[in-house]
Amino acid sequence: MYKNGMHMIWIILGGALGSMARFGIYLAQIKFWASTWPATLSVNMLGCFGLGICYSMYTAGHLTETGRFFWMIGFWASFTTFSTFAMDMFTMVERQQTKILLGYILASIVLGLIFFTLGCKTHKAFI
């Protein structure tokens, strides 16, 4: 639960480091693997792993509230939002919300593609 402005500082610090780490993974993949495969997949899977560890630690009481703000809301959320998507899905599986889970997955993928396409077309309409 949000209590004070210090939590915002932890989110900002974690977010800055998470976004820099994401860019670092991108640069490393280009330099060392010279891959044409999108670095996004590497980032997303690493992010899911990291957020999974933090989620488990937090629910077991092994991660403080400050740690949650820094790692879960700051670092991993800025490293990749896909990890948060995976955590949302995991929570729905745990709660046995199968219909909501399937709708969430379908809506996220389909609407994501639609809105991305709309964004591209909107830009092109103004140039």
Image (spheres, helix red, strand yellow):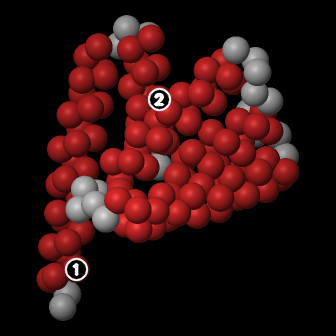
Side of 97 relative to 18 (left or right)? left
Q: Is residue 108 above or below residue 34?
A: above
> In which quadrant of the rendered image does the C terminus lie?
bottom left
Side of 22 relative to 57 (left or right)? left
What residue sits right under mark 2 in the picture?
A: 87
Residue 19 seen in the current view: no
Give the mark nearest the N terminus, 1 or 2.
2
Residue at point 68% right, 22% down? 57
SS at mark 2? helix
Of 36 and 2, nearer the camera is 36
Image quarter for residue 72?
A: top right
Residue 25 percent location from the top left of the image: 48, 58
> In which quadrant of the rendered image does the N terminus lie?
top right
Q: Is residue 32 above or below residue 106?
A: below
SS at mark 1? helix
Q: Amino acid at mark 2?
A: Met
Of 45 and 124, nearer the camera is 45
Per the rendering, the mark at residue 90 is none
Residue 26 percent location from the top left of the image: 43, 62
Between circles 1 and 2, the one closer to the viewer is 2
Q: CA distance from mark 1 to mark 2?
A: 32 Å
What residue sits right under mark 1 in the picture?
A: 123
Crowd rating for badge 1 (residues with CA inside 10 Å; few <14, some 14–19, many 20+): few
Image quarter for residue 54?
A: top right
Side of 26 relative to 62 (left or right)? left
Residue 73 percent location from the top left of the image: 62, 43
Q: Amino acid at mark 1?
A: His
